[in-house]
Image (cartoon, grey):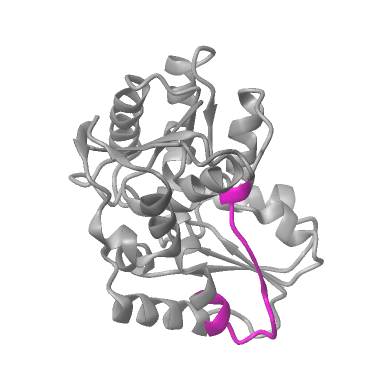
């Protein structure tokens, strides 16, 4: 069993770690685009082209499913990826967990990149799934870049700035960028609300990918899964900043990195 994941950078670590925890025997293929990241400020056509290149490189490793572990790429490229790769290769996108967060009754804060905050896509999700809950959209300037670089001071500064824009009465915070899940505990500690519940997408995406290939989670499976990393389609090592996060250390420890 092999699961591939696509993102511009290390935002895919959260979903990859979720797959690893659910199926320690699954081989993982991480396909990223370090020369083109971040994807957020790029045009929709450019994002689609880059996501498609990463997906094609991953598909050469013959995975059983492909996870688009990036909110931006899911918005702009998911339909194109599915048109090219399905039904032979199931493609699973990433959607902010607004629906389960709103089920708490609110108020809800949606942390997202500045490009996504206020976008028609996010506003449509809020209108469809918020179910009347009060929702505040919070632009997180520089947070994804800081997480990608692994610079702790930059991460703390970006988290603090976003927390200052978050109402103190929120009950739930949606992590609307996959990078943010890597610093979830820092976000929880910074938000002024008492014990806010954080909602990411990694576990749901991992579960959906396994469901699409007809495999049940089995955390007790033998930890035999390997790890292949592709950077711009070329075999690579796990990026050094990835090891600054628990998810990256889990992947590095539980699967030998293969050179292709």
Q: Position of residue 47 (x, y in %)?
A: 32, 38
- Identify the residue at horizontal 80%, vertical 59% (top origin): 103
- Identify the residue at horizontal 74%, vertical 55% (top origin): 100
Q: Position of residue 175 (x, y in %)?
A: 55, 61
Q: Which span of residues is magenta-colored? A: 187-203
Q: Position of residue 87 (x, y in %)?
A: 54, 13
- Identify the residue at horizontal 24%, vertical 59% (top origin): 240
Residue 148 appears in view: no
Looking at the picture, does residue 153 appear above or below residue 21?
below
- Please tell me which residue lies in front, 142 or 187: 187
Residue 198 appears in view: yes
Q: Residue 169 falls in which quadrant of the image?
A: bottom right
Looking at the picture, does residue 86 appear above or below residue 19?
above
Looking at the picture, does residue 151 appear above or below residue 189?
above
Q: Is residue 201 magenta?
A: yes
In the rendered image, the residue lying farthest to the front is 222
For the C terminus, the image quarter is top left
In the rendered image, the residue lying farthest to the top is 88
- Identify the residue at horizontal 79%, vertical 55% (top origin): 131
- Please tell me which residue lies in front, 73 or 86: 86
């Amino acid at each position: 069993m092999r699961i591939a994941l696509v993102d511009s950078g290390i935002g895919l670590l959260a979903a990859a770690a979720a797959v690893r925890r659910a199926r320690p025997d699954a081989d993982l293929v991480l396909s990223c685009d370090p020369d083109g990241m971040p994807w957020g400020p790029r045009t929709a056509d450019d994002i689609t082209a880059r996501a498609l290149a990463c997906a094609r490189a991953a598909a050469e490793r013959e995975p059983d499913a492909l996870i688009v572990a990036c909110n931006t790429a899911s918005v702009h490229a998911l339909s194109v990826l599915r048109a090219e790769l399905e039904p032979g290769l199931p493609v699973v996108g990433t959607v902010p967990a607004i629906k389960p967060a709103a089920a708490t009754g609110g108020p809800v804060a949606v942390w997202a990149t500045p490009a996504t905050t206020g976008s028609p896509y996010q506003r449509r999700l809020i209108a469809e799934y918020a179910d009347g809950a009060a929702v505040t959209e919070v632009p997180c300037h520089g947070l994804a870049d800081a997480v990608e670089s692994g610079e702790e001071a930059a991460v703390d500064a970006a988290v603090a700035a976003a927390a200052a824009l978050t109402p103190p009465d929120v009950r739930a915070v949606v992590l609307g960028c996959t990078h943010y899940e890597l610093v979830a505990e820092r976000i929880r500690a910074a938000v002024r609300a008492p014990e806010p519940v954080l909602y990411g997408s990694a576990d749901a995406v991992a579960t959906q990918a396994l469901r699409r290939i007809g495999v049940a989670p089995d955390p007790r499976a033998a930890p035999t899964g390997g790890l292949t990393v592709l950077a711009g389609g070329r075999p690579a090592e796990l990026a050094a900043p990835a090891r600054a996060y628990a998810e990256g250390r889990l992947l590095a420890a539980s699967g030998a990195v293969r050179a292709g």
